Image (spheres, helix red, strand yellow):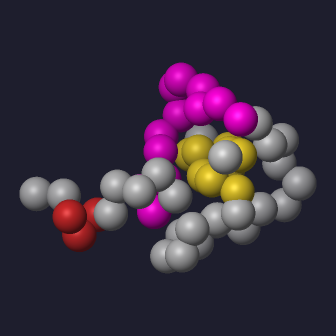
Amino acid sequence: MLYFIKENTVHQYPVAKGCSAVYRDEHLRDTIIHGVKECPYCMREWPANKQ
């Protein structure tokens, strides 16, 4: 799986349903780097499921 970082948030490529991020030639990587937030939609942590 590939990932890209947009506005200090990591997203999967292609972007998951529900995610508002738009991929625009950001660097694609195959690892998740430390120090960035994870997109709740792309990283499969649905906000509705959190309690």
Specify start and end residues of the magenta stretch as a single range: 30-41
**Which residue is at a point 83% across and 41% down the rendered structure image?**
27
In this image, 38 relative to 3: left or right? left
Res 22 quadrant in image: bottom right
Which is the main secondary structure of the residues drawn in magenta? loop
Looking at the image, can residue 26 be seen?
yes
**Which residue is at a point 33% across and 63% down the rendered structure image?**
46
Position of the C terminus, as image quadrant, is: bottom left
Q: Residue extending furthest front?
A: 1
**Does 27 appear above or below 15?**
above
Res 40 quadrant in image: bottom left
The percent position of residue 29, horizontal first and vertical second, equals 76, 36
The percent position of residue 21, horizontal first and vertical second, equals 64, 65
**Which residue is at a point 70% across and 56% down the rendered structure image?**
13
Residue 28 lies in the magenta stretch = no
- Total labels: the figure holds 0
In this image, 9 relative to 40: left or right? right
**Which residue is at a point 64% across and 65% down the rendered structure image?**
15
Looking at the image, can residue 7 be seen?
no
**Does 23 appear above or below 9?**
below
Q: Residue extending furthest right?
A: 25
Q: Residue extending furthest left?
A: 51
